[in-house]
Each structure stands twice: as structure tokens, then as C-alpha cells.
Image: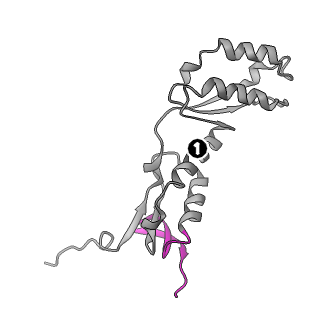
Amino acid sequence: MEEIVNKVASSGLITIDLGELYPQGERVVVDIHAQLFQGLILREKDFREYIKVTDWSRYQDCYVAITCSADAIIPDWAWMLLATALEPFARKIIFGDLEKLETVLFDGLLNKLDLAAYADARVVVKGCGDKPVPKSAYVELTRLLRPHVKSIMYGEPCSTVPIYKQAKK
């Protein structure tokens, strides 16, 4: 009987699972639309009172996206006041929605990758994980890896979709 050889394990492929990078922690949106006077205007005095009386500690260790879902012009100082109140508690604060928050979180993680570890490698970017990885993370990872690797594939090592292959030198 022939010995069974795991060709995937011996192929030299490096698998990157973006789901493994997924930062643990609660994601929260702070929407200030309820702070608008008549749904249109942000009054400084009222907003400062809101900042003062709100228990911001409930956002301890959360990733926070700040926004206003109402169609109103919000002065930049309002976002600054909100960030000042949240900063002692939140892990990360961004302006935008949850999708933008995930993009910012993954961009930060991907920009810390040691790209030298992938020099001339054949890389498989794992798909279909159990964590909500934003599409932007796949784009950014491809952008970062392409100048360094021999090839990039998407999927599972046993069934991949070719994405990039370095031209022969």
C-alpha cells in the first residue's frame, strides 16, 4: 500500500486567514441624530450638556463609530467633543459607520504585517471564514502583498482561484 502524501502541506503555500486577524471587542455606533434641535440643528450648549451628562464609560474597550444619520450639517467641533469624551474609554474611535470602522481596524492590522516574511512566497488568502472580514481588507492585503510574492490565490489550498502570478524573470 502506498503512503498517502499531503501535497497541500508539502506545497510550500502560505495561507493567510484574515479572520484570524479579526480584533475582538464590541463594535458600537454613536449616532448623534437625537441631539439635533428639531432634527436639523446642533446647538452647542445642548450638545455640551449631552456630552457632560452621558456615561461614556459604557463604551469601555469598544470600537466606536461616530456618525449622524440625519441629513444635517454638523460642525467639526462636535465630532471633536465626542471624541474627547470617548477617548478615555474606547479602544478606537472613527468617524463613519460600522463598515468604515472594520476597514480602519483591518487597515491598521494589515499595515503591521511583516511583508518580508512573504518574499517570493506562494500565498493563499483564505476565504469563507466565520468572522466578518470587510471586502476592503482583501483589497488592501492584495495591494500590500503583490510587490513581494510569487503568487496570490484565493480560497482553500485544495481549491483556489488565481489572483496574481509574478512574471518570470
Looking at the image, which is closer to me, 20 or 84?
84
Residue at 55 percent of width and 49 percent of height: 108
In the image, 19: left or right of 4? right
Among the 4 quarters of the image, the one containing residue 39? top right
Element carrying mark 1? helix
Front residue of this view, candidates 108 and 18: 108
Q: Nearer the viewer, residue 49 or 142?
A: 49
Q: Residue furthest bottom?
A: 169
Q: How many marks?
A: 1
Q: Give the crowd class for mark 1: few <14, some 14-19, many >=20 residues within 10 Å.
A: many
Judge left or right: residue 15 versus residue 79.
left
Looking at the rendered image, the quarter that the N terminus falls into is bottom left
**Above or below 50: residue 140:** below
Q: Residue at x 60, y 60 (%)?
A: 139
- Residue at 56%, 26% (x, y): give it: 88
The colour mode here is one colour
Q: Is residue 62 above or below residue 147?
A: above
Q: Residue 28: image x %, image y %?
A: 59, 30
Write the residue at 84% across / 29% down: 72
On whether residue 5 falls in the magenta region, the answer is no
Percent from the top left, x then y, of residue 154?
50, 65
Viewer-nearest residue: 108 or 23: 108
Q: Which residues, given as a range, are shown in magenta?
A: 146-169
| Residue type marked 1 | Glu
Q: Which residue is mark 1?
A: 102
Residue 141 found in image quarter? bottom right
Q: Is residue 74 above or below residue 37?
A: below
Indicate the position of residue 121 as horizontal and vertical percent values: 43, 72
* Residue 2 in picture, x, y percent from top left: 16, 78
Tell me if residue 151 is in the magenta stretch. Answer: yes
